Amino acid sequence: MGLGDKFEAAKDKVTGKVNEAVGKATDDTSQTAKGKAQQAEGEIKDTVADTKANLREDTENAKDRMDDTEGGNRI
């Protein structure tokens, strides 16, 4: 999984939480909504990063299964 993707997702989640808290503290509904949207975006980015990592791992495993274990040749 891309470490950069995970950091970007975490940054969005934290920024969203801060914006939501500031919005609630100042009774600013648009700021609160913006914060919630940023958190959702972070969750989506996190899910995409995990999915990409799982697909990459599954592809590598499939390639390994295709190798002939005795001769090392591909079938």
Image: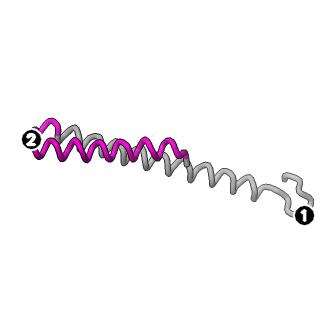
Q: Is residue 65 above or below residue 39?
A: below
Drawn side of residue 28 relative to residue 1, left or right: left
* Left or right: 12 as drawn, with respect to 73: left
Extreme residue in the bottom direction: 70
Q: Which residue is mark 2?
A: 26
Q: Are marks 1 and 2 in contact (CB under 8 Å)?
A: no
Main SS type for the magenta part? helix
Amino acid on which the number 1 mark rests in the picture = Glu
Q: State the count of labels.
A: 2
User: Percent x, y for residue 50?
Assistant: 50, 51
Camera-side residue of 74 and 8: 8
Residue 21 x/y as whole percent: 18, 47
Crowd class of label 2 (few under 14; some 14 to 19; many from 20; radius 10 Å): few
Q: Residue 25, how many percent across, how many down?
A: 10, 46
| 45 to 72, vertically: above or below | above
Q: Residue at x 89, y 57 (%)?
A: 72
Q: Position of residue 11 (x, y in %)?
A: 37, 43
**Viewer-side residue, 23 vs 33:** 23
Q: Earlier in the sequence, mark 1 or mark 2?
A: 2
Residue beneath the point at 82% across and 56% down: 67
Q: Residue at x 85, y 59 (%)?
A: 68
Identify the element where label 2 is drawn.
loop
**On the picture, is 51 further left or further right than 60?**
left
The residues bearing labels 1 and 2 have C-alpha atoms spaced at a distance of 69 Å
Q: Which mark is residue 70?
A: 1
Q: Which residues are magenta?
A: 2-31
Q: Amino acid at mark 2?
A: Thr
Q: Residue 16 magenta-drawn?
A: yes
Q: Secondary structure at mark 1?
A: loop
Check the image and name the residue furthest to the right.
71
Q: Which mark is residue 2?
A: none
